[in-house]
Amino acid sequence: MERRAEFSRWKAQCLSKADLSRKGSVDEDVAELVQLLNGREQFFTTSSCAGRILLLDANINGFEVQKQNCCWLLVTHKPCVKDDVIAALKKANGDATLKFEPLILHVQCRELQDAQILAVRSTHGLEVPLSHKGKLMVTEEYIDFLLEIANQKMEENKKRIERFYNCLQHALERESITDLYPKEKIIKKSNSYSHKKRRNREKADGKCVTEDNDKELENDDDPEVNVTIFPEDY
């Protein structure tokens, strides 16, 4: 009880602070998702980004771009056009890199089981160097090609946000029902299992059921229990 009270105080304190992001507000495409999480007592968001295309000017160590020590030449949460990128590249003095970053969501969770609901990771990104020491290393045609890919990823990212929202909402609703009616769920599972086992025995048409068959029936999964909330390829 004390831990829950402490978490609630921490949540209220964090959500009351000013938004210190570059934009200063939650992105429109992720606002509903942020509202859903902050509306639950076991979660609160600390930062978020709906997805963006950006052009960074920095020194590159290997393939790693340190955004803290670089100049942001261009950033947009909408589809990007070539003319905007070309204009931004004229300001580059170092190594400019075009990036697409998908949904980023940082969430504080009250318990480990709450965090497991949000255990989702995506590799839906893009990072390509365009210039070196201020000199453009690719053609405008290639930049146009890269932006076509980045814009496609942006559109797919919006669809993934919507799917994630729907899956999360469904998972939280299931969790609420389980918390309210834990005994009823256990009884339902037990009755479903007993009915299935009895039905499979009846299909044997009076034949002797061996110990191996008994074991197979006991390992038979109940489709009402094993539900995948987030697909593996999400």
Image (cartoon, helix red, strand yellow):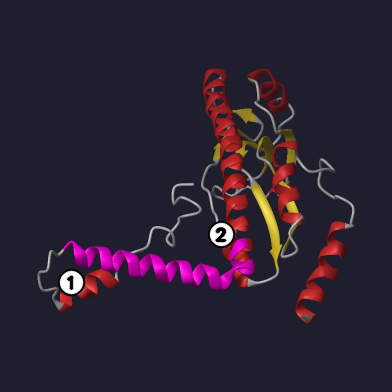
Frontmost of labels 2 and 1 is 1
Q: Is residue 202 covered in magenta?
A: yes
Q: Which residues are magenta?
A: 177-203
Q: Looking at the picture, which amino acid does disc 1 mark?
A: Asn
Rendering coords of residue 180 (x, y %):
64, 67
Query: For numbered disc 1, what is the local secondary structure?
Result: helix
Q: Decide: is 164 above or below 93.
A: below
Q: Is residue 8 covered in magenta?
A: no
Rendering coords of residue 137 (x, y %):
56, 28
In the picture, the quarter occupied by the N terminus is bottom right
What residue is drawn where x is 55% and y is 55%? 120
What residue is drawn where x is 23% and y is 64%? 200
Q: Looking at the picture, which amino acid does disc 2 mark?
A: Ala
Mark drawn on residue 119: 2
Callout 2 touching callout 1 (CB < 8 Å) = no
**Chain-order first, disc 2 or disc 1:** 2
Rendering coords of residue 183 (x, y %):
55, 73
| Residue 44 falls in image quadrant | bottom right
Which residue is more in the foreground, 12 or 25?
12
What residue is drawn where x is 67% and y is 35%? 54
Q: Residues within 10 Å of mark 1 (few under 14, many from 20)?
A: few
